[in-house]
Amino acid sequence: MGYAQTMTRLTVTDLSCARGGIPVLDRVSFAVDAGQALVLRGPNGIGKTTLLRTLAGLQPALAGTVDLPEEEAAYASHADGIKATLTVEENLAFWAQLYGSAVPESVYDAFDLTTLRLRAAGTLSAGQKRRLGLARLGVIGRKVLFLDEPTVSLDTRSVGLFADYLRDTHLAAGGIAVIATHIDLGLDAPVLDLTPFKASATMAGASDEAFL
Amino acid sequence: MIALLIRDLRLAVRAGGGFGLGLAFFLIVVVLVPFGVGPEREILTRIAPGILWVAALLAALLSLDRIFALDHEDGSLALLATSPLPLEGAALMKALAHWLTTGLPLTLAAPALGFLLHLAPEAYGYLFLSLALGTPALSMIGTFGAALTVGIKRGGLLMSLLVLPLYVPTLIFGAEAVRRGAEGLATAVPLTMLAGITAGAFALLPFASAAALRVNLR
């Protein structure tokens, strides 16, 4: 997999990926320019999460290349990575420190966390936790976001807040987002249906055994 | 890197963080031994170095499976893996945090507990020194074991089986240093070996741990 140093542009060429040793997607190709989002669609099990994990570098691709600017990708999974005994502020401050950035005050407004700042994250509701997990993206300052079902357990208003953040802050600043979602975020973004890329069951090279 | 260390230390001292668990276990074992073997001074003095080292080793083992399992459960391990911090650095910081919350308190408490076991007066310095040199290796080797078994449900048992044999050299040289110290013999060789094991573990195992984590995160 080659990570070429280019302008902010995500190019995926003939990417094949597997989950648990079974190929799920075959020869996926797309490109996303700076300031654009791409919405991934497809039935459960088609490989949206697998594709996002491969793009984020958490697992190797079977074949194909991913070109994106180095040190610019961030991944947000189903799990938020929130520590229950830390407060909202401490959770965000940790990620900011890890990425060498500061927590912008605007992030608390953007994700409606202002009144929750000093609450232990363990006492938040599911939707509030999700907002905190998404607020991490506003803290770490990465340009290319891979978002896996970002709106799970969010109410309509919070979905709106998140869509506003993506459109007005992230994409407006030249960012890129690849989003797997089943709902309409109200973004003016092209949709990629993964169904045609479903890998055939007999595809070779599927083993991801570590020592073979 | 320091951010992860501070976060782990903070998590350890908050509710349910497990700080003090190893120390309490160490205390309980050392207090129970005289009840089990009887109060004769000579016997206790003879077995004290071994008991103290075995108890310290088991206490360190107790909290190992938390090192990566909690981060894996809540998803932060995957987020750490995609962050600018290399996994090697993360493994090193995790081991350091484990030592600061387990090995260091054990080292500081050991001389007081040596008193309960009638440890020979000459041996106190060597007990402290050998634990200070040896417990970092226990944390680092344990971090490697935790990295190997992350993501396995109830992986703690498997991890103990993997880690305990790797702990044996540390135990042998650690207890030997204290025993020789108690008898007034030269301790340079076991202490040097102990330091060597620790240095070797910290030089190699962060990389091995990171490789194991990468495989387990797929």
Image: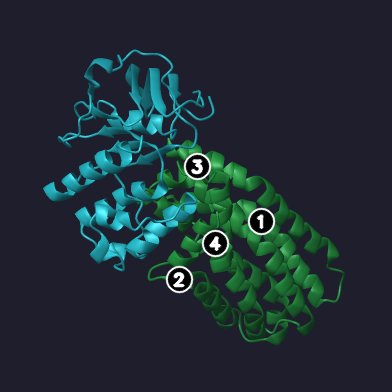
Chain colours: A cyan, B green
Tell me if label 4 and label 2 are in contact, CB under 8 Å. Answer: no
Chain ID at mark 2: B
Viewer-side label of 3, 1: 3
Residue B156 in view here: no
Residue behind mark 1: B168
Chain ID at mark 1: B
- Distance between mark 4 and mark 1 Cα atoms: 19 Å
Q: Are marks 4 and 2 on the same chain?
A: yes
Q: Residues within 10 Å of mark 1 (few under 14, many from 20)?
A: few
- Distance between mark 2 and mark 3 Cα atoms: 25 Å
Chain ID at mark 3: B
Instruction: Name the kind of residue labelled 1 in the image.
Output: Val
- Residue B213's tag is 3
Q: Are marks 3 and 1 on the same chain?
A: yes
- Residue B98's tag is 4
Give the quadrant of residue B33.
bottom right
Identify which residue is drawn at 48% across, 52% down. Answer: A98
Residue behind mark 2: B13
Of labels 3 and 1, earlier in sequence is 1
Number of marks in the rendered image: 4
Of labels 2 and 3, earlier in sequence is 2
Tell me if label 4 and label 1 are in contact, CB under 8 Å. Answer: no
Of labels 4 and 3, earlier in sequence is 4
